[in-house]
Image (spheres, grey):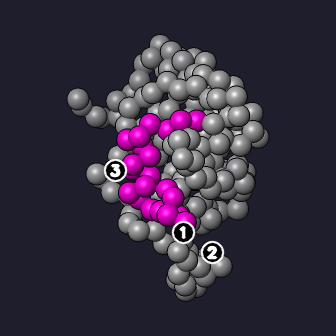
């Protein structure tokens, strides 16, 4: 559903979903997955339910936005979270245009098929190094999708270097 929101919004129109993403729909955990021969990812039911609770497409199906991340992975956003991130990106200064091009230029809106899968576009699979084995990482309001070999390498390097807890205690 699109509503007129007045000056300052992209073209004066903005998508409005059923509800904003809430604390009850949090993405967490790390799961290993395999892309099928067509490049489809079977998204776990608990994550599909969170996307569905966030906002439904006009045809009644759950949707999400998939885009590139500067760290080399892909990011899956619920529609309401993506709208807020998109607005923030568009307000960045001209000096950040490379980041804006990377993220907004790589963004694509996707729908789940009847089997709960999404088709990862081939250009985004190539850019993220996704071939077959991948890792889905829940980070609160979004999910990251990594090539498993790249994820394992980055995780090992981070652990070897020591992870700054940023004053967080467990």
Element under disc 3 = loop
Which of the two labelled residues, at mark 3 and mark 2, occupies the earlier sequence position? Answer: 2
User: Could you say whether the residue bearing mark 1 is in a helix, strand or loop?
Assistant: loop
Which-is-in-front pick, marks 1 and 3? 1
Disc 2 or 1, which lies upstream in sequence? Answer: 2
Is residue 140 visible in the rendered image? The answer is no
Residue at image position (72%, 54%) is 105
Give the foreground label among 2 and 1. 1
The residue tagged with tag 2: helix, strand or loop? Answer: helix
Residue 121, given in percent of the width and then of the height, sits at 71, 43
Residue carrying label 1: 58
Residue under the image location 61 percent in, 52 percent down = 110
Q: Earlier in the sequence, mark 1 or mark 3?
A: 3
Query: Is 9 positioned to the left or the right of 78 in the image?
Result: right
Instruction: Report the label total.
Output: 3
Residue sitting at x 58%, y 36%:
41
CB of mark 2 within 8 Å of CB of mark 1?
no
Residue range highlighted in magenta: 41-62
In reply to whether residue 33 is colored magenta, the answer given is: no
Q: CA distance from mark 1 to mark 3?
A: 21 Å
Task: Give the residue number, with chain letter if any, for mark 2.
Answer: 10
- Residue that numbered label 3 is attached to: 25
């Amino acid at each position: 559903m699109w509503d007129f929101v007045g000056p300052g919004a992209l073209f004066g129109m903005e998508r409005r979903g059923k509800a904003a993403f809430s604390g009850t729909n949090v993405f967490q955990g790390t799961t290993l997955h395999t892309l099928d021969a067509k490049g489809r990812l079977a998204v776990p039911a608990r994550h599909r339910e969170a996307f569905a609770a966030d906002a439904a497409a006009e045809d009644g199906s759950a949707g999400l936005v998939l885009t590139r991340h500067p760290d080399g992975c892909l990011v899956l956003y619920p529609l309401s979270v993506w709208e807020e991130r998109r607005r923030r990106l568009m307000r960045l200064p001209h000096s950040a245009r490379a980041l804006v091009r990377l993220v907004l230029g790589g963004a694509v809106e996707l729908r789940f098929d009847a089997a709960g899968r999404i088709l990862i576009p081939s250009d985004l699979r190539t850019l993220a190094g996704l071939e077959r084995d991948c890792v889905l990482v829940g980070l609160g309001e979004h999910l990251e999708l990594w090539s498993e070999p790249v994820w394992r390498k980055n995780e090992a390097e981070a652990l070897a270097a020591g992870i700054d807890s940023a004053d967080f205690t467990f």
